[in-house]
Amino acid sequence: MKKLSVFIIFLLLLKFSLILCSLTEASCFWRTKHNEDYEGELWTDCGFVLTMDPSPIEDDFYSSIIDFRIPTRKYEFFLVLFFATDEINRNPYILPNMSIYFFFSSELCFDTSKVIEFVHSSRNSYLRFNYECGPSLCYTLLIGPSWTTSVKLTTYTMIPQIFFGPFHPIPSDNAPFPLVYQIAHNDACLPHAMVSLMLYFAWNWIGLVISDDDQGIQFLSDLRVEMQRNGICLAFVNMIPDDVQLYMARAVIYDNQIMTSSAKVAVIYGEMNSTLEVSFRRWAYLGVQRIWVTTSQWDVSTSKRDFCFDTFHGTVTFTHHHSKVSKFRSFMRTLNTSMYPVDISQMRTQWNYFNCSVSKSNYSSMNHCSFNTILEWLSQDKFDMVLSEEGYNLYNAVYAVAHTYHELILQQVESQQISELKGMFYDYHQMVSILKSRVFMNPVGELVDMNQRKKLCGDYDIYSTWNFPQGFGLKVKIGGYSSYFPQSQQLHISEDLELAMGTMQVPTSTCSMMCTPGFRKFHQEQTPDCCFDCAQCPENEISNETVDMEHCVRCPDDQYSNAEHTHCHQRRVSFLAYEDPLGMTLACMSLCFSALTALVLGSFVKYNGTPIVKANNRTLSYILLVSIGFSFLCSLLFIGHPNIVTCILQQTTFGVFFTVAVSTVLAKTITVVLAFKLTTPGRRMRGMLVSGAPNFVIPICTLVQLVICATWLVTSPPFIATDLSEYGQIIIVCNKGSVIAFHFVLGYLGSLALGSFTVAFLARNLPERFNEAKFLTFSMLVFLSVWITFLPVYHSTKGKVMVAVEVFSILASSAGLLGCIFVPKCYLLLMRPD
């Protein structure tokens, strides 16, 4: 039962991979990785000496020189050289009647120190590593894939060397190493390509692990510029020194830095076979799980743990795009092992290629789980060697040398230095000048340029390698990058990949969680730009279009933000309208009091001959009643939608009519005092009373108020204003323009009322039945009480409530004047005429 469960799990893994392969239609293959290294082999470099001979190569030539076990990881290089030289030797248009071949020593692939010893021992042998090409011909050394170890050969060899490893930016001008030429494409666009991938997956918190050398520092500088330009931050930078002792002293620091960092994505850049690789494998052993973004040489298994279906994981590698060498597959199928002493089974343990079309056709049969079905399916796998980037570079390097030799022979023939093709070269400098400027088209149709200064950025294929249990890995092409396309189209991620991933979650790599709508980013001091807190948008501001907004957007004046600060809603216009219960009530009160005032005035006119009407100065009573009536009606100007006319008339009519009313009360009070205090006949003041001199108080006081109102209207007149302080409302009010002028009007009314109250208070105890001094005193007391209470209440409210307070104060003070002065008289006129 246990075995059956294991096979079922394995079957599910295969089914998932088949679906992914059938959708992507790209290089799709299982790679089998053993957990242990092959007998301790490292990523050692190889040096292959390339030369040619007029005679054909002996069938047992390679069998005689390969008298050692080829390192497993170097099988690809040997196979590429076998294939490339065989293809050239079969081509009648390149080096006709000549044979190109390579030779080497076993030390050239195992240890750099042995390589140098080999070179020393070969100085005086047939290799002759110097500027003199010797009696036969010049040699070319193919070195790689590690720059650090390969370049050590340049000190001891004085022959042209072609480096087939990844492009190295430092010696691109060939000044430090004039005899070393690189075949790979320029990697100047690699930082931008990686940043484009980060932007696609919304990764903005990235770790970086590089080698502490010129190449690593240059890459750090270029990558940091691209990241800063696109708002991506470095969570940490581990610069691994080449010195082993120094690295061991700092290893714990490097481990803690990457293990404690919140970055889920790390870029690793540098060479294998170094302390950088030691760190990489150490972190894998410690269980550090990251998405590694790197180059093709780091295409290695990173984890021994079980595979998780719900998470995107593994290694993302950028590999220079190159066409598939289709003839290489045929060469491998028909490989003559007696002529080329290699063990293909060694390669089968490294790479197994499952033909996607075969797998797809048999997918339906996988629904029935049985041991025989699984074994039958596994037996249908077809071995195919997919060239790595270094292998393809080595393939081009062989052709570069072949084209150089071919051009040298043609020049010799044209100059008549030789009569027949012998392949004997004596001018080393001529060979170098041809090699460094060689431009040719390789057999798969791609242009190869050896000019170091004209190296262009190459296109990239982006692969993802996912690790499976028991050392299996799935490598799938997920997209590509080309710097020659428009900015928005340079990075391409396969849509089929997104479909194949389904519900698979791509890990986020951010310093801070994204700010949701309604919040904005708030940066703290001395923190990277990618690290921030989220603060809710201020009042009446929103953030709803995108996440991680730097600034909130303010709603238009006629709109307001909802409680979540994600949307703007239309504000409701608010003013003291007639339709509102409050406005309707005040309007009805104003009309009722105005009607009541009209009735009182009618009664006084009807009974104008009665003693009580005559005794209290009929003219002043009429003026007071008319002014009170207009005071009631002027409150209607405060109700309804404000406009510029009503805003101007509100305060001026209120001030003028109340001034007339209060000054009339003052005139009546003065009249009462003069009537009862002046008892001596013939005096001048008695004449003033008879002539109606107190009546002049009304126009004089009114004129002063008119001057104040005119000054107000000229200097700072009232205007329509909107108040947005209330949530969800636009309060339309009449702004007074000048608050000082408004208080001057009130202050002037208050001084008149206070004067009237003082005079009436002094005459309150005068005799006679028709003395109204008490009523005038009480009316002024009510008037002053209303307006003294009005000021604090008015300034503590806003909107239509503030307007309602002023309207109510107008009605209350006017009703106080009407009730206190005229209600007792009406009672006598109507109820007690006797």
Image (spheres, rainbow, N blue to C red):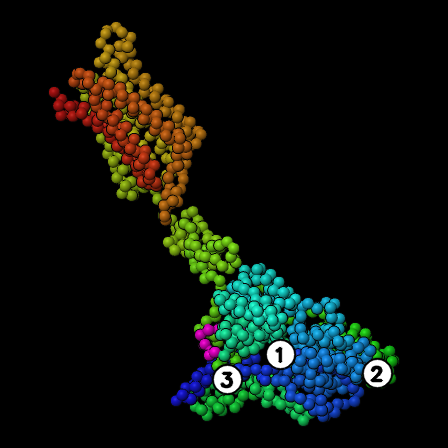
Magenta region includes residue 231: no
Helix, strand or loop status at disc 3: helix
Q: Amino acid at mark 3?
A: Lys
Q: Which residues are magenta?
A: 305-316
Point out residue 606 in the picture as x, y percentages from the top left corner: 20, 23
Crowd band around label 1 with a 10 angstrom C-alpha radius: few (<14), some (14–19), many (20+)? some
Helix, strand or loop status at disc 1: loop
List the residue tagged with mark 2.
Answer: 135
Residue 335 visible to the viewer: yes
Q: Residue at x 57, y 62 (%)?
A: 227
Crowd band around label 2 with a 10 angstrom C-alpha radius: few (<14), some (14–19), many (20+)? few
Q: Amino acid at mark 1?
A: Trp
Are the residues at dot 2 and dot 3 in contact (C-beta closer than 8 Å)? no
List the residue tagged with mark 1.
Answer: 43
Q: Residue at x 45, y 76 (%)?
A: 308
- In this rendering, the count of numbered labels is 3
Q: Is residue 592 left or right of residue 179?
A: left
Magenta region includes residue 306: yes
Crowd band around label 3 with a 10 angstrom C-alpha radius: few (<14), some (14–19), many (20+)? some
The quadrant of the rendering that contains the N terminus is bottom left
Q: Residue at x 22, y 30 (%)?
A: 596
Q: Nearer the viewer, residue 685 or 39?
A: 39
